[in-house]
Amino acid sequence: MISHIKKMSSSTIFPLLLLLTILSLVVLSPIITMVIFGAILAYYVRFISQKIKPYVKYDTLAIFLGMILLTIPIAILLYFTITQILGISSLLLGSVQQATAGNSTMDLSHINGAVEKLGLSPAITQNIVDAIKSGILQLLSAITNSLITMVSSIPALAAQILILIFSIFYFARDGDKIVQYIKDVVPDKDKSFYREVLEGADDVLKSIIVGNIIPAAILGILSGVVYYFLGYPYVILLAIVSGIAMFIPIIGPWIVYGVIGLFSILTGNTVQGVLVIFFGWIIETTTDFYIRPRISVQYSEVHPLVFLLGFIYGAVTMGIPGLFIGPLILGITYAAYKVYRQERVKSKQTQD
């Protein structure tokens, strides 16, 4: 069998490999995002398991413990988030049902008072209040429909999570074999190029956590503390949204601070609204201009625009996993072109 393969020309081998690869991707297309996401998370699981390995006897046990340690904070975060979302959902469902029946009991007295202070005519004031009420009802209906869609997709989500767990485990356990396979099939003349690209990928994976996730987590925690002491409800959910909003270009967490502050002012809580905007400005400035540069300075080789585009459009095209997959793909592409350019420059200098 091997002798027959050796007799095959490369012009037949590589088209066959390409065809099989394409067919494999077609078969895996429904779950490919979770497989890639699992490979990325396996990178962090391997890091944790290597720290645990000196204290346990078996590699598999170290990987399992690494997966558990990585899962615990995520599970806790999801638990409190889902709990608060369910609490809000029950209120939203009640409001929508009342609105559908035509007997909504929403209290808009504070908003009525705020609009009346604008000094407009009674007709215009009533139109503004009606528009606000209609917008709130439409928002409640849209959120409720989204929640119903999420509940109906739970079985498919469970299957995706199962694929993710197996992907993390096997990539974490057999990662060395995959790297060795790549080394075996790459021509010797190209190994230096791929080595530098893999080092760039390593920097990207570290930067995702150190340069982006950690600052966002710090901002979310500090924002949660502010929300708690200012007396806002659903503190954990607001803190999570504030941390995620840090990835939004230009606006960032101001989309949360501004909306919450403006709403508080409109509903008569002027001091609360001003304070949340003021402290939000301090938190955002400190995190963006001091904490992020301090902890991510060693991974500054990748341009910030790469991460920005990767986070935003990765999430748009692939959902939550895209927050990791997007920056990784763009980061590796950036690193590959950078290394290629350096090789070309060196080649030209050598020829001159």
Image (cartoon, rainbow, N blue to C red):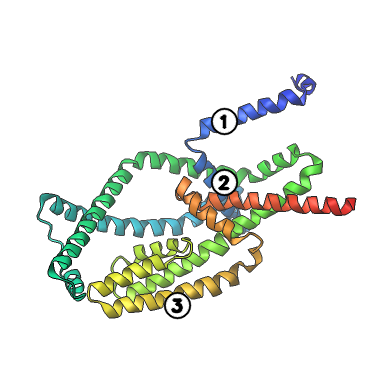
* Secondary element at tag 1: helix
From this viewpoint, which residue is outermost toward the bottom?
271
Marks 3/2: CA distance?
A: 37 Å
Q: Amino acid at mark 3?
A: Ile
Query: Where is mark 2, residue-wise?
Result: 39
Residue 275 position (above or below residue 85): below
Q: Which residue is mark 3?
A: 282
Q: Which amino acid, by three-letter code, is at mark 1?
A: Ser
Circle on res. 209: none
Q: Secondary structure at mark 3?
A: helix
Observer able to see residue 108: no
As drawn, is 159 to the left or to the right of 89? right
Res. 80 in view: yes
Estimate the x, y position of residue 25 in percent, counting from the top left.
Answer: 55, 33
Q: The N terminus appears in which quarter of the rendering?
A: top right
Q: Amino acid at mark 2?
A: Ala
> Residue 135 placed where, x, y %?
24, 57
**Numbered disc in front, either 3 or 2:** 3
**Mark carried by residue 24:** 1
Q: CA distance from mark 1 to mark 3?
A: 50 Å
Vertical comparison of 185 with 216: above or below: above
Residue 188 picture location, percent across and down: 81, 41
Q: Residues within 10 Å of mark 2 (few under 14, many from 20)?
A: many
- The residue under the point 50% across, 50% down is 314
Quarter assignment of residue 294:
bottom right
Q: Earlier in the sequence, mark 1 or mark 3?
A: 1
Task: Report the Cα–Cα distance between label 2 and label 1.
Answer: 17 Å
Q: Residues within 10 Å of mark 3 (few under 14, many from 20)?
A: few
Q: Which callout, 2 or 1, points at the residue further toward the start of the chain?
A: 1
Q: Earlier in the sequence, mark 3 or mark 2?
A: 2
Given contact means CB atoms under 8 Å apart, are the residues at marks 1 and 3 in contact? no
